[in-house]
Image: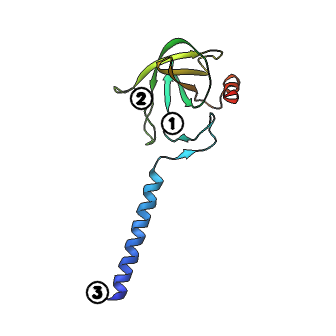
Amino acid sequence: MTARTAFSRSATMRAVLATAALAALAVGCTTTSGSSGGGGAASCANRVKFDDQTYRDLVNIKFTVGDKVGTATTLACDDTGGNSESDSADAVKSTAYKIDGLDTRDAIAVGDSPDDLTFFVDDSGDPPAAVQKLIDAS
């Protein structure tokens, strides 16, 4: 093998390895800045289904919990293009609570006890005005 052939193979191998490394980075979970509620939202956002409606979580929201209103089901991560809203035998179910001053169509609190709840807002678009007031006040 000549020096030129060895250099050519070495350069080709480095290019292949660099391309593979970049491809691996591109496949990882990404974050998006500017989401409501502060902090970045991962591409696999925490989402639940309650009363045939999908909600996404918001962090650092101050709210007062109301009464239990039913059961919410955690949706599977949809980072592969599959159907994340399909019923699954391993779906996690948690108690859903009303948030004082808000309609359950706009937002709910979800968790195993009133002391450990996550705020979820309707996932169909921008937060409703009443939810935005809570976000702004938090």
Residue at 62% of width from left, 16% of height from top?
103
Q: Residue furthest front?
A: 115
Q: Which residue is mark 2?
A: 86
Q: How many marks?
A: 3
* Disc ID at residue 45: 1
Q: Which mark is residue 15?
A: none
Comes first in the chain, label 2 or label 1: 1
Quadrant assignment, res 83: top left
Which residue is farthest left?
1
Q: Secondary structure at mark 1?
A: loop
* Kind of residue at disc 3: Met
> Is 95 drawn above or below residue 9 in the view shown?
above
Q: Which residue is mark 3?
A: 1
Query: Whole-percent x and y of residue 94?
Result: 44, 20
Residue at horizontal 51%, vertical 42%?
43
Chain-order first, disc 2 or disc 3: 3
Compared with residue 118, is residue 44 higher up or lower down, i.e. above or below? below
Residues at marks 2 and 1 touching, judged by CB atoms closer than 8 Å: no
31 versus 96 height, above or below: below
For numbered disc 2, what is the local secondary structure?
loop
Residue 34 x %, y %: 64, 41
Characterize the local packing of mark 2: few (<14), some (14-19) or many (20 or more) Cα atoms within 10 angstroms. few
Residue 35 point in image, percent of width and height: 62, 38
